[in-house]
Image: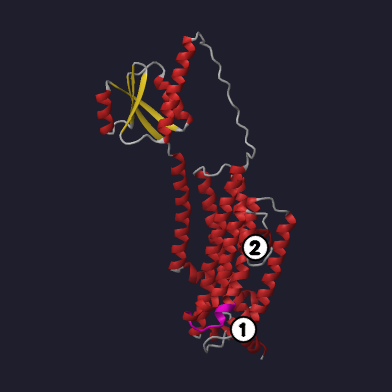
Amino acid sequence: MTEPSTLSSTSLVGLVARREISARIRDKNFIISSAVILVLLLGSMALQVVLQSGTEESRIGVVGATPGLEQALQAQGDALEVDVSVVELDDQAAATAAIEAEDVDSALVVQDGEYELLVQESAGGSLEAIVQGAVAQLSLAEQLAEAGISDVTVPEVPVTALDPDADQDGQRVVAAIIGAALLYGLLILFGQFIAQGVVEEKSSRVVELLLATMKPWQLLAGKILGLGVLGLAQIVVIAVVGVAGAITFDVVDIPGDLVGTAISVVLWFVLAYAFYAAIFAVAASLVSRQEDLGTVLMPTTLVLVVAFVVGIQAASAPDGTLAVVTSFVPGLSPLVMPVRQAAGEVAIWEIGLSVVLMLAAVALIVRLGGRIYAGALLRTSGKLKMREALRAERS
């Protein structure tokens, strides 16, 4: 068997990465969080379908029906998206009994050309509009007939949408906001995984054994790579299930736009993860107890919260100063730029510049963070300041 010390840097990084994947894929928190995200995603789409498919119904009893009344009531109901069913009743007493027994929602009594609407408590806006419209239609037809006018042409009013793509734009924005929320949640989740792993290794002194066979940067790179592969696989699965569910449930009109938004979110996750994973690992290396993690991780967590809030705001004002500026700020851009792309027109050069700035920031964080990480890993006496860790790395 090959001794670990003879392995190449790539092999050592790979060993650490596989170890992290193996450990976390069996972690209950990881499994539960993945299942919860998928259930919430599919459940929200199913709920949306149920809410959209629900049609208001109204059962109207009629006493003394006149020719054309049933058709007029149903036509008015169709205009107001209400499914109207008409029930013929013998007299007013029968109408009252039917309402009290909840066999009908209301009853329209027609007697000597007069109309009266009976209800249990009050007539809703749609019910009153349906009955008033139907009665007005019949009355107008009768008056025209009395005047000798039988052939009346009612012109159709064409509907012209000033912004026909508004609905599709809204769907893309909703998808981007959901994507930003997933990014936020997954970055917090995997950042915590990395931080907890670092502290566990320091507190148990396992890190001393690991550093006897590899360099600190190899350990850091393996952790980031392993959990990064796991996180990427998770968000890809979520994106695929989400897109497939949206298409299956017919939640979106343009599947291609949804797929494009999902791909954009996944690609931004890669950059965001590389940036924040290094920060979480470096921050965790400064402490030796799980109880101290909250303190050192709080600033980074607050940055993620700000990025998410600004990303939500960018949905309503993608060209606003705040959204535009923050979409170029490393650390904030992964949660802002995808929403801007979905909510408005973003030039290619803007996306390119934002990506370049993120790559530069990732390189800087990894380089500087690697030095802090190397200097802090073997210091297990309480909290350590970054300046002290850098000084220890040089010595």
Quadrant position of residue 324: bottom right
First to last magenta residue range: 282-290
Q: Which residue is mark 1?
A: 386
Name which residue lies at 58% across and 47% down.
170
**Kind of element beneath mark 1:** helix
* Residue closer to the observer: 283 or 304: 304
Q: Position of residue 346 (x, y in %)?
A: 70, 53
From this viewpoint, which residue is outermost toward the bottom?
395
Disc nearer the start of the sequence (2/1): 2
- On residue 18, which mark appears? none
* Residue closer to the observer: 290 or 228: 290
Residue 118 vs residue 53: left or right? left
> Does any portion of residue 15 appear in the rendered image?
no
Eyeballing the image, is 338 above or below 168? below
Q: Which residue is mark 2?
A: 333
Eyeballing the image, is 337 above or below 45? below
Q: Is residue 287 magenta?
A: yes
Q: What kind of residue is marked 1? A: Met
Q: Is residue 34 magenta?
A: no
From this viewpoint, which residue is outermost toward the right?
349
**Kind of element beneath mark 2:** helix
Q: Position of residue 378 (x, y in %)?
A: 56, 87
Eyeballing the image, is 121 above or below 144? below
